[in-house]
Amino acid sequence: NVKRELKMPVQCGIVGLPNVGKSTLVNHLIGQKLNITSRKPQTTRHAILGIRTDEDRQVVFVDTPGQHIDQPRAINRYMNKVAKAAMRDVDLVVFVLDRLKWTKEDELILKRLESSESPVLIAINKTDRLSDKDLLLPHVRDLSARLPKAEFIPISALQGDNLDQLYKLIGDHLPEGEAMFGEDQITDRSTRFVVAEIVREKILRQLGEEVPYAST
């Protein structure tokens, strides 16, 4: 176990809609491939912990399933429940948005964050794909009016743009305490679970229709 005093949260929740890049972001922040990714919605089915231990801090990231307004299927209701629980229990929330997009689902998450006592960072992802970055500022102004307590940062999880600054902002909000996990541990999940997820990623990327979802 890590014996020195470290700054750390119990959990740092990464929330947002499907396909906004939450899992890619967590993988880059912990510096290793842990969470599987694909273009298909509902790739992330569980709240998976990703652990990063540095010289003076240990950060526990929670990659949550994408949230939905319509919940006709049991799996959607389950994933919404997992995501809402993570938002309620964490010490810090990182709300990931896809560029300048804003949907009813984003509005739903925003309303949930309004009642959250945890600090909120809003990471505007995929900014490397913006043809006109001057549009970012008015978008941030509009979001600031909706959630004035939040801090905003433009990033590209895929390219690694501004992730060091995001990690610094996360560190600024961490309470002090002892480390929860060993220095070499990157997740609380078993090797069996991680291997099963990697296999599922291959299926999601190569097959279509119902097969990838039934593979779980």
Image (spheres, rainbow, N blue to C red):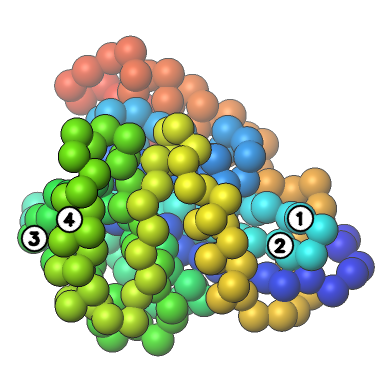
Near mark 3 (Cα within 10 A), the count class, few <14, some 14-19 or many ≥20, is few
Q: What element does badge 3 sit on?
A: helix
Residue bearing the label numbered 2: 58
* Secondary element type, mark 1: loop
Residue 195 visible in the current orientation: yes
Tag 1: amino acid? Asp
- State yes or no: discs 4 and 3 in contact (Cβ < 8 Å): no
Q: Which residue is mark 1?
A: 54
Residues at badges 1 and 2 in contact (C-beta under 8 Å)?
yes
Residue at 32% from the left image edge and 69% from the top image edge: 84
Q: CA distance from mark 1 to mark 4?
A: 35 Å
Q: Amino acid at mark 3?
A: Lys
Amino acid at the residue labelled 4: His
The residue that appears at 61% across and 67% down in the rendered structure is: 171
Indicate which disc, 4 or 3, sits on the residue closer to the N terminus.
4
The residue that mark 3 highlights is: 104
Query: Mark 2 is on which residue type?
Result: Gln
Name the quadrant containing residue 107.
bottom left
Left or right of 187 in this view: 148: left
Relative image position of residue 57 (x, y in whole percent):
74, 64
Residue placed under numbered mark 4 in the picture: 68
The secondary structure type at the circle numbered 4 is loop
Question: Counting residues from the N terminus, which is met first, the one under dot 3 or under dot 2?
Answer: 2
Check whether the beta carbons of the residues at disc 3 and disc 2 lie within 8 A of each other: no
User: Gap between marks 1 and 3, in whole Å?
Assistant: 38 Å
Q: Nearer the viewer, residue 73 or 157?
A: 157
Q: CA distance from mark 4 to mark 2?
A: 31 Å
Give left or right: position of 148 versus 138.
Answer: right
